[in-house]
Amino acid sequence: LAVAMKAGSRAFAAYKGGIYDERLNLSGRDDIDHGVVLVGWDDTKRAYMIRNSWNTTWGEEGYAWVQYDTANIGYGAAWAVVVKQ
């Protein structure tokens, strides 16, 4: 699922692993500046797994865990439900 999030902080750029939790530096619910792909989630970690476009040297080989309810992840996401008739 393609989603947007706030990734403009140095902490996100420096992410190497673990669970990213950025609740600071947000000016509002629609404060977003980066597109990523949400590829999964883990309710025990309370985090989404995202794939970033920067390259495999960033994060966990190009992926990151982003804490639920942080960095405005998913704001403005849209999806379609197909109903077979």
Image: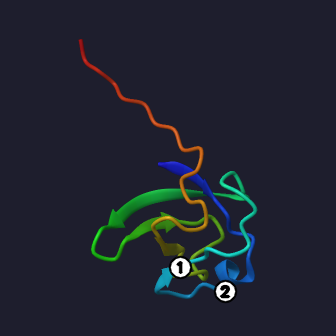
Is 31 in front, or is 8?
31
The structure residue drawn at horizontal position 55% and vertical position 81%, both measured from the top left corner, is 59
- On the image, the x and y values in percent for residue 15 come to 60, 84
Residue at the front extreme of this rendering: 28
Viewer-side residue, 64 vs 75: 75
Question: Do tag 1 and tag 2 residues touch (Cβ < 8 Å)?
Answer: no
- Tell me the element at label 2: loop
Q: Could you tell which of marks 1 and 2 lies nearer the N-terminus?
A: 2
- Quadrant containing the C terminus in the rendered view: top left
Kind of residue sitting beneath label 1: Tyr
Q: Which residue, as the protein is rendered here, is positioned at the far top? A: 85
Residue lying farthest to the left in this orientation: 85
Give the residue pinned by disc 2.
Answer: 14
Q: Nearer the viewer, mark 1 or mark 2?
A: 1
Q: Is residue 39 left or right of residue 69?
A: left
Position above or below: 4 against 50 = above
Q: Amino acid at mark 2?
A: Ala
Q: Secondary structure at mark 1?
A: strand
Residue 14 in the image, given as x and y percentages of width and height: 67, 86
Q: Residues within 10 Å of mark 2 (few under 14, many from 20)?
A: few
Among the 4 quarters of the image, the one containing residue 53 = bottom right
Whole-Å distance between the Cαs marked 1 and 2?
Answer: 10 Å
In the image, residue 85 sits, relative to residue 43, either above or below, namely above
Provide the residue designation for mark 1: 20
The quadrant in which residue 41 appears is: bottom left
**Seen in the image, is 54 located left or right of residue 50?**
right
Residue sitting at x 68%, y 76%: 24
